[in-house]
């Protein structure tokens, strides 16, 4: 446990040195909120935007950013020394996921603060469901990101992480509702982690009804992603 706590602190310090990366993680959803909030383009309101933007924040930090940074840490042998310590691969995954969760809490706080202060956004929040969605979404997305980073070369990780980001962006109910997609894509979207995450955020804001299938899908990824990452992750590229 002490090793995991120490590694989490290191990850947070390392992330603080990449201020431009954190700025990008915050600016993208914030820019979307400000643009559509002020213009009202396509009839999108802040209420309609917030669940998808929160899911986008988790997708960006937990999957794409984490996968790419970890992939290049492997490439340049930053993680190689950890392989000689008593800390197992699961410990590294817990530490990285925890540091990402803390980063996301800051992201969410900034996004919500701007929505409250600039657009006077008010909503009745199911706090319990919101926290569950945040934790499960972070665990699932981080597991997938670390699985990619821990099994592929850095260049392949960069391509796959960005490609998966675009896929989940389209199929996650973040840009467009999944019900406008063709039936086969609609069904695929409900299996992947992004759409259930967006749906749970919507349910936590009482915009849609809660469905157990969304929770079950997110629990599935929150278990499968970290488990596969802990099993297959390697400290350096082969």
Image (tube, helix red, strand yellow):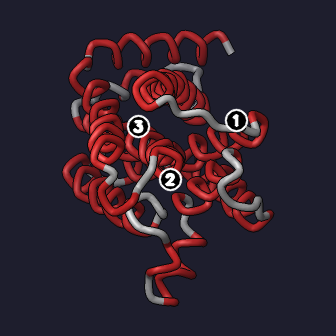
The answer to whether residue 144 is seen in the rendering is no
Residue at position x 78%, y 36% in the image: 128
Q: Nearer the viewer, residue 180 or 90?
A: 180
Which comes before the other along the chain, label 3 or label 1?
Answer: 3
Q: Is residue 74 above or below residue 116?
A: below
Q: Is residue 220 above or below residue 76?
A: below
Q: CA distance from mark 3 to mark 1?
A: 17 Å
**Residue for badge 3:** 61
Instruction: Choose mark 1 or mark 2, whichever is in front.
Output: 2
Q: CA distance from mark 1 to mark 2?
A: 19 Å
Which comes before the other along the chain, label 3 or label 2?
Answer: 2
Q: Is residue 18 above or below residue 148?
A: above
Callout 1: helix, strand or loop?
A: helix
Task: Please state, as top left, top right, bottom left or bottom right, where the N terminus lies in the image.
Answer: top right
Residue at position x 65%, y 10% in the image: 2
Left or right of 40? Residue 230 is: right
Q: Nearer the viewer, residue 163 or 104?
A: 104
Label 1 with label 2: CB-CB less than 8 Å: no
**Residue for badge 2:** 48
Which comes before the other along the chain, label 1 or label 2?
Answer: 2
Label 3 with label 1: CB-CB less than 8 Å: no
Q: Quadrant of residue 98?
A: top right
Residue at position x 70%, y 46% in the image: 204
- Pointer 1 local density, CA inside 10 Å: few below 14, some 14–19, many at least 20: few
Left or right of 159? Residue 202 is: right
Q: CA distance from mark 3 to mark 2?
A: 22 Å
**Residue for badge 1:** 131
- Pointer 2 local density, CA inside 10 Å: few below 14, some 14–19, many at least 20: some
Q: Is residue 141 above or below residue 122?
A: below
């Amino acid at each position: 446990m002490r090793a995991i706590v120490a590694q989490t602190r290191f990850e947070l310090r390392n992330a603080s040195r990449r201020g431009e990366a954190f700025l990008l993680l915050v600016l993208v959803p914030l820019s979307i909120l400000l643009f559509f909030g002020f213009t009202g383009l396509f009839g999108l309101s802040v209420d309609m935007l917030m669940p998808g933007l929160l899911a986008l924040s988790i997708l960006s930090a937990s999957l794409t950013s984490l996968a790419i940074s970890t992939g290049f840490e492997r490439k340049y042998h930053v993680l190689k020394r950890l392989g000689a310590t008593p800390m197992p691969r699961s410990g590294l995954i817990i530490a990285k996921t925890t540091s990402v969760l803390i980063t996301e809490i800051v992201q969410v706080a900034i996004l919500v603060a701007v929505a409250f202060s600039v657009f006077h956004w008010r909503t009745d929040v199911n706090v319990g469901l919101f926290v569950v969605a945040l934790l499960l979404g972070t665990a699932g997305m981080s597991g997938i990101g670390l699985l990619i980073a821990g099994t592929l070369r850095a260049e392949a990780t960069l391509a796959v992480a960005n490609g998966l980001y675009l896929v989940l962006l389209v199929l996650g109910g973040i840009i467009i509702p999944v019900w406008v997609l063709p039936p086969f894509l609609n069904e695929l979207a409900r299996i992947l982690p992004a759409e259930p995450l967006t749906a749970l955020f919507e349910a936590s804001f009482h915009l849609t009804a809660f469905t157990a299938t969304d929770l079950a899908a997110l629990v599935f990824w929150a278990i499968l992603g970290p488990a596969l990452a802990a099993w297959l992750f390697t400290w350096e590229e082969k």
